[in-house]
Amino acid sequence: MAEIDGNTVIARSLKQQGIETLFGVVGFPVFGIASAAQNEGIRYFGFRNEQAASYAAGAAGYLTGRPGACLAVSGPGMIHGIAGLANAWSNCWPMLLFGGANDSYQNEQGAFQEAPQIEAARPFVKLSTRPDRLSRVPGYIEKAVRTALYGRPGAVYVDLPNDIISDRIDEQDVVWPARCPDAPKSLADPQAIEAALAALRGAKRPLVIVGKGAAYARAEAGVRRFLDATQLPFLPSPMGKGVVPDDHPNSVAPARSHALQQADVVFLIGARLNWIMHFGLPPRFAKDVRIVQLDVAAEEIGTNVPTEAALVGDADAIMGQLNAALDDEPWSFEADSGWWRDLRDKMEENHKVVAAMMEDDAVPMGYYRVLREIRDWTPRDAIVCSEGANTMDIGRSVLPNYEARHRLDAGSFGTMGVGLAFAIAAAAVRPEKKVVCVEGDSAFGFSGMEVETACRHRLPITFVVVNNNGIGQGVENLGDPVPPHVYTPGARYDRVIEAFGGKGYFATTPEELRQSLKEAVESPLPTIVNVLIDPKATRKPQKFDWLTR
Ligand SMILES: Cc1ncc(C[n+]2csc(CCOP(=O)(O)OP(=O)(O)O)c2C)c(N)n1
């Protein structure tokens, strides 16, 4: 049998475990791993910073259902990669970070880029580990994959010292475990299924909330069937958007606050009662709201509000149980109930406020006018990435999604700098899709250099920078001192991409924006549409101050 090196053992293990794409930045001691991965047929995307590469890995894990993988150099590179571990931890996405490390025989001697990497990763991962010898590396990688996937998905860190990477071994001495199967799917307790349906049947003002857990579990067919059968009103969480198309007749998203405040029974499908849902507490929710909760993680049950019926397990399998129970005993919520009439009235009222802003052709433009144009030029099945404050928040209601796992945003961790990375990940793992990435100008700046990554890999992403000269709101001109939230007024972000062979567009009027988007969306090149908006533009007036907190 032939001798092989550590790089090859690591690369082969990744391939064998179903990892087809690797994101990272090379340097000591991981150069050879990236090349070996390419030799094994893994696509390697070299980034400009490990932060973005690690964000990309998390998104790839969410989109594909197998852990996304990131490769980082020792010390500072691995430390940057922790940003992605934390983002994956918060969003419950399966990802692996492989960090190079100094030779283990130099530990505690002040080695080049030596750092307490295993300890640094630990708070954000399900497992932080280091192989003890080359022969067992595939076993460690199989366990890393299994840990990231099984139970509540999450991040895993694998430390790779140089002496393991550069070691050589007879191929027959390597222990190769089988490919880790996808996570086993568990069903809910049949009594909990009955309790859940009984709670919903007895509700006067029921509401379903569909989260990204439903999207991750590929439960879209079951959730749609359930809503069609029960005629219950539903709301998506930000990344739960698209599990059920936003134009589904049961969507009450335009009456979101009202629906949350008034509902008496809420059925959470893979959605958590965290800050995004105002913890399930007043004033966002009714004081005595009753909760039916479907989650893959038993420990999530009862978070912030006691749960009346707990459906623990795989969302797709459990939606199957609920649908089977409804087949046996059909039931649907009354279509002309006071609750539905109330929700429809509220949706109509909110629609009018927003419609006026979307049709306002005044220059400089506001968010709604810009986002309406983006909506009109975005293909129906595009993957939409979004980040920023107003740009993302308003975009969530203006930019529709029609398919599951087609929206990626700052998510549970509220991370800026994820947008470009997510767009690259989406274009990498779903090459058949158009990817549109809608960013605030501040958000763009966090990972802006990754436009070079998109150009180098010829990924025809359309980046739209909604430019108001700063964080949240900007100014017309720089003052002295420069206000903390302000960036260069009128910055030409569109020119950045041209340095790398992409195409930039600059727009200040609705007509220029329309023309730019039309060309950009059809272009075979990566493009940036930089649209200047009113630096003082903001959201529609909010009825409650806690909505903006
Ligand atoms: C990593 C990180 N750093 C800082 C912040 C704080 N923050 C929240 S939103 C935001 C940017 C908002 O401005 P912009 O992207 O221009 O969007 P806008 O609201 O102007 O549309 C920042 C910096 C964050 N959420 N994440």
Image (spheres, rainbow, N blue to C red):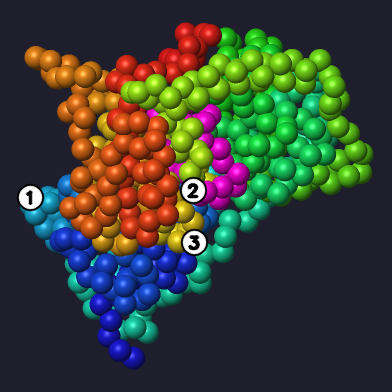
Q: Earlier in the sequence, mark 2 or mark 3?
A: 2
Dividing the picture into quadrants, the one containing residue 116 is top left
Q: Amino acid under label 3?
A: Glu
Write the residue at 17% across / 47% down: 76
Q: Give yes or no for residue 74 being in the magenta stretch.
A: no
Q: From this viewpoint, is residue 511 visible? A: yes
> Which residue range is magenta in the image?
379-404
Q: Earlier in the sequence, mark 1 or mark 3?
A: 1
Is label 1 or label 3 in front?
3
Q: Amino acid under label 2?
A: Ile
Which dot marks residue 110?
1
Which dot marks residue 383?
2
Q: Amino acid under label 1?
A: Gly
Q: Which residue is mark 3?
A: 432
Rounded to the nearest whole Å, what is the CA distance between mark 2 and mark 3?
Answer: 10 Å
- Mark 2 crowdedness (10 Å alpha carbons): few <14, some 14-19, many ≥20: many
Write the residue at 26% across / 20% down: 474
**Viewed as shown, does residue 178 lie left or right of 43?**
right
Dividing the picture into quadrants, the one containing residue 282 is top right
